[in-house]
Amino acid sequence: MSHIETANTKLSLSVFVEIANALEVTTDDLLFDTPNDNISSASSEIIDILNRCSSREAKVITHIVKAAKEALDMYS
């Protein structure tokens, strides 16, 4: 790994895929600097939705999102 990091060895495609698998990310996540952009976009959309909600609606949506995240964590 240190040889790859110091550019003493070229990274083969198979090793690149193995690294992505070990990190549990896609190869696109490693190649393209966009994950934060996707999160920012989703965050902005969620904030926009919440801004259009009553206080009660916002609380319900918050509980739904928390439950969805807990379910995703449990099954991943």
Image (tube, rainbow, N blue to C red):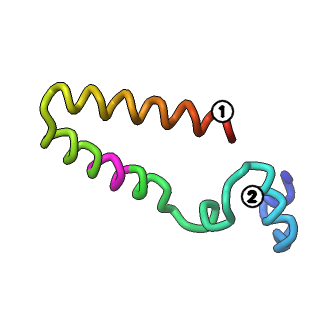
Left or right of 60 in this view: 17 = right
Q: Is residue 61 magenta?
A: no
Q: Of helix, strand and loop, which mostly describes the magenta segment?
A: helix
In the foreground, 14 or 70:
70
In the rendering, at what x and y percent does residue 14 appear? 87, 70
Q: Nearer the viewer, residue 64 or 38?
A: 64
Please state which amino acid type lies under the numbered disc 2: Ala
Is the residue 22 above or below the residue 7 in the image?
above
Residue 61: mark: none
Q: Residue at x 33, y 46 (%)?
A: 43
Q: How many marks are shown on the rendered structure?
A: 2
Mark 1 is surrounded, within 10 Å at the Cα level, by few (under 14), some (14 to 19) or many (20 or more) other residues, namely few
Q: Position of residue 54 (x, y in %)?
A: 12, 32
For mark 2, give the secondary structure.
helix
Region rendered in magenta: 40-44
* Res 59 → quadrant: top left
* Percent of width and height locating residue 44: 27, 49
Which residue type does callout 1 highlight?
A: Met
Picture residue at 82% right of the left edge, 69% below the top: 11
Q: Position of residue 50 (x, y in %)?
A: 21, 39
In the rendered structure, the answer to whether residue 54 lies left or right of residue 20 reads left
Q: CA distance from mark 2 to mark 1?
A: 22 Å
Of the residues tagged 2 and 1, which is closer to the observer?
A: 1
Q: Residue at x 40, y 57 (%)?
A: 37
Tell me the residue that label 1 is attached to.
Answer: 74
Residue drawn at x 48%, y 30% is: 67
- Residue 20, label in figure: 2
